[in-house]
Structure formats: structure tokens, C-alpha cells
Amino acid sequence: MKKRAVVLGLGLGISLLLAGCGQQQVSHHENHHGDAPTHQQAQSKQQNQSKQVVLSNSQTAQSSSSAATVNPHHVHLTTQQLGTMVALLKYPNWFKQGVADGSMYYSDQPNTAPGSDLNGFSYVTANGDPTSYIYFQLQGENVVIKYVDASHADCVADAPMRTISVRLDTLINDYYNTKKKQDEVNGYANRLLPESQYGKNVDNQSQSTGD
């Protein structure tokens, strides 16, 4: 009888011990899933992060490309616009001051003097001495610019004519590749006066002075 009671007691103790271990394992398993993501969740999160990085880089590339190079073949420039960019390249302060004073002119009537090196060239000018003329001509992909350089001459009459060439796409990407730059160039270009009006303005000024 005592032997039987001992066996029953041992059996009951073992059952209680196993039940406690089972609850501890279940509790640990539940905590494991509650505190940390599963392998599938971690993999999904990693993929989402990768997608976000790619999208972010793509958006950055798109936003930066809006102010990048502009295809010159898709830009149609007037004589005033091209002349403005040429003048901003060569003598920006002089040009801006002339526009502000209302004394900057342009000509899209090419020079036709026989044997002249300026045949076919347009120009912007303040109608002063020869240094106040900047001649330019589009030749294929390049803009050829001619100007009198008096920087090392004793007098303007002895100053040589210089010729430089700049790529059209370089001019456009330096002065016309963003909305802000286009507005600036167009603002100056719209205020250039046709050379044919210069004589009339001089006459009007003379009459005003005479009165």
C-alpha cells in the first residue's frame, strides 16, 4: 500500500514537472514571435528598404537632370537670344549696363561688304568705337565670335580683330538650361533695339537737345 502511494506520488510529480516545462516553452515561443520578426518578415522589410533606396535615387536623378544638359537641336534661338548669350560670355557687365541704359542694339542683317571677314555675321553693339561691336555667326555646331581686342593696343585703331569659337551646346548649357537662365536671357534679348532704330534715336536726341 505504501509502495503504491509512493508510485502515485512520483507519477503526479513528474506530470506536474512536465506541464510546467511545456508552459515555459510555450511562453518563450510566444515571446520570441512577439519581440522579433520572422525570417520572412525580415526579408520582406529588407526588400522594401531596397525599393525605397532605388526610388529615392531615381527621384534624385530625375530632379537633377532637369537642370542638366539641353539638346541644342531642340532649342530655336533668335538673333537677339544668341547675341545675348554671346555678349554675356564676352563682356557681361558692359552688356548688362548697355541694356539697362537702353543703348544696346542688334543687327540680324549680315555684313555684305566685298572681301570682308564679317560677311554673314550678325552683331550686338552699343554703337561706339569698334570695340563696342561683338560679331557672331552660327556655323554648324559652333558659334564663331569676332571682336576687336584693344587690351594690349596703344589705340583702338591698332587693335587686332580676334576670332574665337564656342560650341552652341556649351552656350546653351551655360546660359539657357534652366527656367531662371532662360528668363534672364529673354529679358535682355527683349530689350535689345534693332540697329535700324539707332539713327532715329540719335535724331530724336539731337532735336530734344536743340529745343
Image (spheres, helix red, strand yellow):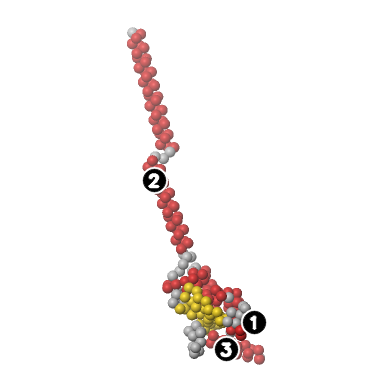
Secondary element at image label 2: helix
- In the figure, residue 13 lies in which quadrant? top left
Picture disc at residue 44:
2
Are dots 2 and 3 in contact, CB under 8 Å?
no
Q: Choose mark 3 or mark 1, whichever is in front.
A: 1
Tell which circle, 2 or 1, labels the residue nearer the N-terminal end. Answer: 2
**Visible in this render: residue 80?**
no
Foreground: 196 or 30? 196
* Dot 2 crowding, Cα within 10 Å, few <14, some 14–19, many 20+: few
Are dots 3 and 1 in contact, CB under 8 Å?
no
- At label 3, the amino acid type is Gly
Q: Could you tell me residue 64's position as x and y percent? A: 47, 62
**At 41% across and 46% down in the image, what residue appears?**
46
- At label 1, the amino acid type is Asp
Q: Could you tell me residue 97's position as x and y percent? A: 60, 77
**At 40% across and 24% down in the image, what residue appears?**
20
Q: Quadrant of the N terminus?
A: top left
**Visible in this render: residue 47?**
yes
Are dots 2 and 1 in contact, CB under 8 Å?
no
Q: How many marks?
A: 3
Foreground: 170 or 57? 170
Give the residue pinned by disc 3.
199
Tell which circle, 2 or 3, labels the residue nearer the N-terminal end. Answer: 2
Foreground: 207 or 125? 125
Label 2 – label 3 distance at C-alpha: 77 Å
Give the residue pinned by disc 1.
154
**At 35% across and 17% down in the image, what residue appears?**
11
**At 48% across and 77% down in the image, what residue appears?**
143
Secondary element at image label 1: loop
Secondary element at image label 3: helix
- At label 2, the amino acid type is Ser
